[in-house]
Image (cartoon, coloured by chain):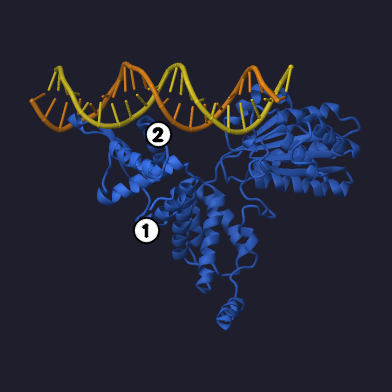
Chain colours: A blue, B yellow, C orange
Amino acid sequence: MQSKIDELFDTFLQQQTIYKEKDALKCTYIPGTIHHRDGEVKQIAQILAPSLRGEIPNNILINGSSGVGKTTVVKYVAKSLKTKAQSMNVPFDYIYLNCKLQKINTQYRLLANIANELGRTVPATGLPTDAIYKIVYELINTRPTTLVVILDEIDAMSESSDGLYCLYRINDELANGSKVCVIGISNDINFIEKIDTRAKSSSSREDVIFPSYNAMQLKSILEQRASIAFQEGVMEPGVIERCAALAAQESGDVRRALDLLRVAGELAERKGFKKVSESQVTEAEERIEADKVAEQVKDQPRQSQAVIWSVIKLSETSPKGLATGDVFDYYSDVCKKINMKPLTQRRVSDLIAELDILGIITAKVISKGRYGRTRKISLAISQQMIPKVTNILEQELMVD
DNA sequence: CCTCCACCGGAAAGCCGGGTCA
DNA sequence: TGACCCGGCTTTCCGGTGGAGG
């Protein structure tokens, strides 16, 4: 047994790796040059440039859908600016916070995280907000510098908390030459309006919009990353085009394209291939899709899971189209079995509509004339995924 | 052309948990 | 600390509807 597993590791180590620097496929990787974002890079650099002269730059709000390079560009500019500032001996620093990942949704959390980044640990809770405001204020004030605070996924911050406002305000109170500049990154277009009605200091704020990439642009970005990540000649022709095309038709999200490439590479490596071919991309796509569906099902509230379960079970006997009533009846039984309070049909109807939007089921409103009007409901997940989903649901719902 | 089924889907009110403010 | 507010979820109520069958 031991020798067998040893052997496995050995062959793995002996295997010639197809990678040069695998990290380049991660979405957090910041490449040396950024493609197709010259305008945005320039725009942001220009806004921040005054900090090199010790002037206070305007705040920035960046908008654009996911995976269009917002975070990468901002980090890139901030990093370059820091290097430049260091060479000029100008005090400058930036901190990067991801509001969603770090659960920054209140003023307190925001200030606490900033304090942490500045090297001062504060309790995660307990202190009054103004006490922590004071701490942050002191931290910034004691060493004169221009501090850029990058807040990614800023829409995760509850709008009622004046988190942004307190950062804007800090500027007015700072005394000895320190400045704070806020860069907000959001993929919710409505966010601008929400902010506008509240923090009125929009006068010193500039908006930057990131447009989506098209397939050609995705392709050249992928080529760049692939040339860093993989050994020479590992990519069979058409692989990159395929990844780019798939991602482009979905949303133009680079992250998605990179994922495809990464998973395809992993699949090829695991099989001991020396090259990555299109068939791995296809497989990667299925794999990612499957994971996505599994994740979505798992994330659903229990009630929705019971609805999915009902649809799966009913589909076994009548695969082409259930009526809302059928699903509701079965669902009610399921609820009784697992001791859950059933929702009304009205509500279940909405859940069905939601699951339709998610793409887990398809539900189309049709009229059967005299026999009423209902939704025609069927499963939208592929056949081979059903066992996996059933498994998840069994665990989540604890039915048998 | 009318009827009438079986549900759709909007409006509004109730409930609940979590956060805020005095 | 408790009153209060807010937003999300759910229920209640109800008018609306496409088209098979009469």
Say which mark, if any, is on residue A14.
none
- Quadrant, the N terminus of chain A: bottom right
Q: Are marks 1 and 2 on the same chain?
A: yes
- Image location (x, y in percent) of residue A214: 52, 46
Residue A213, relative to residue A233: is it above or below?
Answer: above
Label 1 resides on the chain identified as: A
**Identity of the amino acid at label 1?**
Gln
User: Are there few (<14), some (14-19), or many (20+) residues within 10 Å of tag 1?
Assistant: few
Q: Judge left or right: residue A311 versus residue A169.
A: left
Q: Residue furthest bottom?
A: A3
Q: Residue at x 25, y 48 (%)?
A: A318
Query: Is A77 above or below relative to A21?
Result: above
Q: Quadrant of residue A304?
A: top left
Q: Position of residue A288 (x, y in %)?
A: 48, 56
Up-down relation of residue A271 to residue A281 (above or below): below
Determine the CA span between mark 1 and mark 2. Answer: 30 Å
Observer-nearest of C16 and C5: C5
Q: As rendered, which of A400 and A356 lies closer to the eye?
A: A400
Q: Can the viewer see residue A110 in this picture?
A: yes
Other-residue count near label 2 (Cα within 10 Å), few / some / many at <14 / 14–19 / ≥20: some
User: Which chain does tag 2 point to?
Assistant: A
* Foreground: disc 1 or disc 2: 2
Q: Which residue is label 2 attached to?
A: A343
Please, is residue A123 above or below residue A218 in the view?
Answer: above
Q: Within the image, what quadrant is residue A150 found in? A: top right
Residue A384: give its label. 1
- Position in image of residue A277 (x %, y %): 48, 67
Relative horizontal placement of residue A245, taking residue A363 as reference (left or right): right
Q: Nearer the viewer, residue A85 or A11?
A: A11
